[in-house]
Amino acid sequence: MKFSSVEDQSWMYSLVKAFPIAVHNYIFYRKIYTTGLENIPEEGAVIFAPNHQNALMDALILISVKNWQPVFMARADIFAGQFLRRFLFFCKILPIFRIRDGKESLKENNFVFQKAVEVLKKKRFLVIYPEASHKGIHRLRPLKKGITRIAFMAEEATNYTLGVKIIPVGINYQDYYDFRTDAMINFGKPINVEDYAALYKENPQKANHQLVEEIKKELSTLIIDIQDTENYDIFETAREILAPYLIRKNGKLINNFKNQILAGKEVVGILGKIKESDHEEFEELAALLKQYREGLNSTNLTDRIIRKKYKIWGILLRTVILIATFPINVFGFVNNFVPYHLPFLLTMRVKDRNFHTSVRFVLYLILFPVFYGVIFWQLCRYTDSWLFRILYMLLVPLTGIFSHRYYAYVKKVAAMWKMFFNKKKTLYARLGVLRDKIVEIFKRKI
């Protein structure tokens, strides 16, 4: 696909994306929660404005929720080399040049922006990350005006008859780096650009500013947005401790990731109000949260271990289950070691940790089919039973996922035993006391 036809529908694109999207939705992530799909028009000049926390994964989760082919705009420095440029155009990605790419390159944006306008005029979907860069933190960073500039350019080019809409998209991850965790994508209500047309004709700069502010306001409601940079860790610790309490208080029966996000947003909001209304109490709560976080780090425990207060019979039962399922773990570990662990070793060479998950995902797409092909080839060489071959190949990926979760479960059970044997020691006992104090103060404020 060429630059000139990047917005055209492509059967080859649909065919090629099927495999990575299947891996993304059903293997790489355990579950993806989606809300607000009803806010997406069937067609029209629509710009999607997602937050940007996890590099390539932010694009994959967006195209995974519908059978569609939106056009993306991404940083120009990834368009290195003729082959990569062609591949990215095939993936329906347009480059955006930044000041760091050189002042001369900024002139290229005029050409690219005109292409983006053409995409909208053809009533295609366009995706622009208004933060203009990615970072794995629960905070909406300052938005750039490129998104509003393109929206107004498209309206101007059609004498304000195009009806451009901007849809904020909130993307939340349970873990930015781990395999088999959850993710959530929220589509907000459309923002009508035509509402700012009169202001834009009068004062373009003011119109751009106000539209950016509305996008920022709406986008902030769709994610966990901790704007207090000085107390970021305090807010994160509070969210971890208090979200389960709010989930129960709000009558939710399941402590799933969707409910954790909703409760987490509420915790951040309540803590922010405490800081504004009662600074002294906030300082007290912040001190307790800091001590609690330091205690967890020094004991290498998680809040869940402290909160659950596991009994000896429960720990013993989990230990028996680990022992009984150990052979399954060994089978999965051996048959998946190379394709699973090699990407981890290779990503250690990538300096920007925010790219690690994206690089690993691409490597998984290559290594797993190749390695499974080698296993199947060996089975064909040494076994004559097709039933055995089929059963073996079905078990390999399933036990691979099991082995990954087994390791996490081993760490969890080990932490339970650690807490059980040390619960009378001052440091460990203090964790429970600190947690109870934090929850009690929080209860008084809701």
Image (cartoon, rainbow, N blue to C red):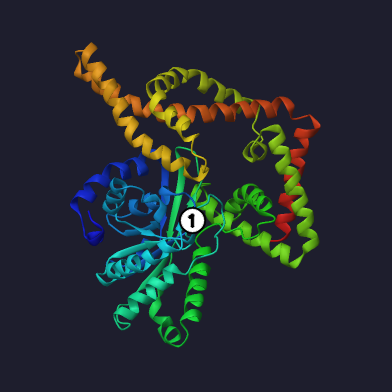
Residue in view at x 41 percent, y 48 percent:
56
Residue in view at x 30 percent, y 84 percent:
159
From the top left corner, tell me how far across and down residue 307 is, in percent. 66, 40
Q: Quick one: SS at disc 1?
A: loop
From the top left corner, tell me how far across and down residue 65 is, in percent. 34, 53
Residue wearing tag 1: 133
314 left or right, relative to 430 = left
Q: Residue furthest front?
A: 104
Q: Quadrant of the C terminus?
A: bottom right
Residue in view at x 47 percent, y 85 percent:
203
From the top left corner, tell me how far across and down residue 178 is, in percent. 49, 38
Task: Say which amino acid is labelled 1.
Answer: Ser
Residue in view at x 45 percent, y 37 percent:
179
Do we see residue 175 in this rendering? no
Q: Is residue 433 above or below residue 163?
A: above
Q: Is residue 49 above or below residue 384?
A: below
Q: To which quarter of the image does residue 420 belong? A: top right
